[in-house]
Image (cartoon, rainbow, N blue to C red):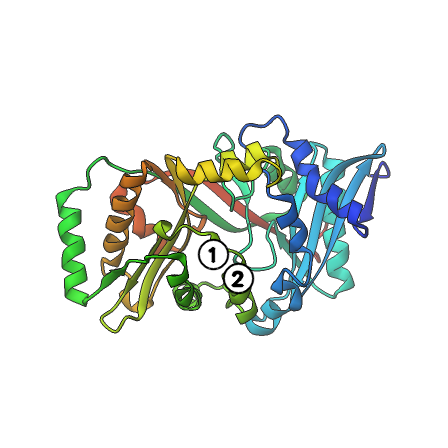
Amino acid sequence: MENVIIKQVVTENDLTNFIKFPMDLYKNNPNFVPPLINDEKNIWNKEENPALLYSVAKQFLAYKNNKIVGRIAVMINNKEAQELGIKKVRFGWIDFIDDEEVSKALINEAIKYAKENQINKIEGPMGFTNLDKAGMLIFGFDKLATMIGIYNFDYYPKHLENLGLTKEKEWVEFEINFPEVLPEKVVKFSSLIAEKYKLKVINFKSKKEILPFVEPMFKLLDETYKHLSTYTPISDEQIETYKEKYFPFIDKNYIICVADENNELISFAITMPSYSKALQKSKGKLFPFGWWHFLQAGKKNDRANFYLIGIHPDYQRRGVTSIIFKEIFDRFTKMGIKYAETNPELEENKNVQVLWQDYHPVHHKSRRTYSLNINEQFG
């Protein structure tokens, strides 16, 4: 392993190299979707990323023969440790050439960081919080990546397993092919449920009308997923950041909110047109021409992605999703969208997976985080 040199990212130039490395590694891969470079830089800026208010992180680059051959970031989420009692080093942004000398050196860096902080476990790939990308692709390498999913070569999981890391959590993803006509029984059932529970779809006339619902959406997200052992509540700072930076840019037609008779939010779904091809064409930059590809993807697209979905526990398994799906179907049909991909869902989260069961979902991707107890032998 003496041929591999690990260097910490300390300069602006180091960070740029850290961000651009996978773009070089995957430059000939048709399924890799690059992130926006500026967005990636903001992840490591305390003024832009509220997770850094309660987390610490370092990034590293691996060099071999004076060439960058890998990268990794290591993080400790102190909020996770305090609120859930979970102490671990998260590792993410891990990429490497097909060389086990390189992957071993990178994982060793995560182990070293854990030991320095008296922590016995590492897990990844993952980000700072539940809203960050997580899970190494283990199935679906031939499918186009989405904005919110990690893409990696098929040798990645083999390397980690050879290094003694084992499965910690697994996510599944589905593709839904929308029918030309929604079955009459679905339409009737949707109306029946709305009438039974006195529910209604909120029709936003402008983006401005969405903003008062942003905080309730995230609070509902907490209610939906709080039963999962790994879920950490979203901080007020995170809510405010997402509200200010992202919601003004979301098309109102892609947000579905369902409220009760008191106008209280009980369910929502945030979808977006697929920006995967737009990101590929923009090559990580919005300017000078990247914005045009995004604009076109928003106007004309036959594919959409689910990003977030929340249902209050009191309404889960009561057919409320039929209201959401009917609304999504009506809107997507008008926009010419025929396919939708779900966001990654934990394999044990049956409450979410049951949402799609009536629409013949195709399981097309799986991803996994790997963990290691560093007290175990690691040679």
Q: Secondary structure at mark 2?
A: helix
| Residue at x-position 29% and y-position 45% | 331
**Is residue 373 among what the camera can see?**
no
Q: Is residue 333 visible?
A: yes
Question: What residue did someone put label 1 on?
Answer: 248
| Pointer 2 with pointer 1, Cβ within 8 A | yes
Say what secondary structure mark 1 lies in.
helix
Sort mark 2 into few (<14), some (14-19) or many (20+) by Cα contacts within 10 Å.
few
Residue at position x 29%, y 58% in the image:
203
Query: Label 1 amino acid?
Result: Pro
Disc assigned to residue 234: none
Residue 102 location in percent, x, y? 75, 38
Tell me if residue 80 comes above or below residue 72 in the rendering: below
Q: Quadrant of the N terminus?
A: top right
How far across and down, in percent of the image, does residue 41 sit? 68, 50
User: Between residues 188 and 74, which one lies in front from this camera angle?
Assistant: 188
User: Residue 14's spot in the image, x, y percent?
Assistant: 79, 46
Q: Residue at x 64, y 42 (%)?
A: 160
Q: Position of residue 85 (x, y in %)?
A: 58, 71
